Amino acid sequence: MHADGLPGTAAGDPSPPPGLVVTGRYDQGPGYGVDRPRGSDSWLFTFTTGGRGLVRQGGARTDALPGHLVVLAPGVAHRYAVAPGAPHWRFWWAHCQARPSWAPWLGPYAVADGLYVVAPVPGILHGRIGAAFDRMLADARRPAQGILPGADPVAVAHGSLACELALCALEEVVLLAASGARPPAPGPGVDARVRHAEELIAADPGAPHTVRSLAGSVALSPSRFAHLFTQRTGRPPMRALREARLRHAARLLEVTDLTVERVAAASGFPSPFHFSRVFRARYGVPPGAYRSGERL
């Protein structure tokens, strides 16, 4: 599969569909850039090893410097390119469906809705992270060869074994980066009331939370709370709740044998039909297929 042939669902540059695990390494010069005004269907992980990149998501922007793991969630409008004035940008990258268990490791490094910057990763870990990406690239190649010609190889994983091995290597990257980097200190824009509401959602995503109930827990009117939450986190409270519920549901599908209907109910979705629809939109496959491993 050639990069130009990867299907995309949005105007702009194409992106792999959520069912694929695609990885590679690039060393791009000035003028290189990717624009996805409707985001990607899959997660994008980049780890910079040289030069400098620039990543934009909505109104947020971040430099991608050596030792920076920058992660973009699906469905988030974004652009990334070689930073102005930089001679090049050398980086590892991977498109895939992130495992729900990675959310707590990435969460402290969120800088905007769907944008995570795990940085700076100490130099002592760069070699191990590079080795993990090397393994991911090698594992994605088996059993079939999905390598593009040229100096910067790209591999598309084929088969559940290759996908699982590649994702295990990427999980090591996330763990190493998150364990070595220092989470950003809360800035002046952090609001204790918003943080408390986020903690309530995280503690029990399946509870019957509403804007009114969350607002009441922090002594705010529903309209004021919704405005404050959106302003501080970059997403409305009900969108944050839906994402938390979907992550919880994915985890239940992975580690329990509950029926899809019971998973839906335990995750706060009263209608299994609605649950199946939003789950498929988020993860690319229906709940039953996700459990059987078709997500790999």
Image (cartoon, rainbow, N blue to C red):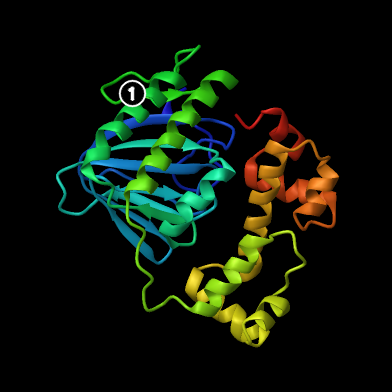
Classify residue 244 by image quadrant. bottom right
Spot occupied by residue 71 in the image (x, y as percentages of width and height): 42, 48
User: Is 163 in front, or is 132?
Assistant: 132
In percent of the image, x 37 and y 47: which residue is there?
A: 179
Measured along the vertical axis of the image, is residue 95 above or below residue 206? Answer: above
Spot occupied by residue 279 in the image (x, y as percentages of width and height): 70, 47
In percent of the image, x 38 and y 64: which residue is there?
A: 60
Spot occupied by residue 66 in the image (x, y as percentages of width and height): 23, 45
| 10 horizontally vs 66: left or right | right
Measured along the vertical axis of the image, is residue 58 above or below residue 133? Answer: below
Spot occupied by residue 77 in the image (x, y as percentages of width and height): 47, 56
User: Is 79 in front, or is 109?
Assistant: 109
In percent of the image, x 75 and y 48: which residue is there?
A: 277
Q: Is residue 286 visible?
A: no
Classify residue 28 by image quadrant. top left
- The kind of residue tagged 1 is Pro
Query: Label 1: which residue?
Result: 153
| 29 horizontally vs 110: left or right | left
In percent of the image, x 22 and y 39: which residue is there?
A: 124
| 140 horizontally vs 199: left or right | left
- Quarter in which the C terminus is drawn: top right
Q: Is residue 87 visible?
A: yes
| 102 horizontally vs 122: left or right | right
Dot 1 falls on a residue whose secondary structure is loop
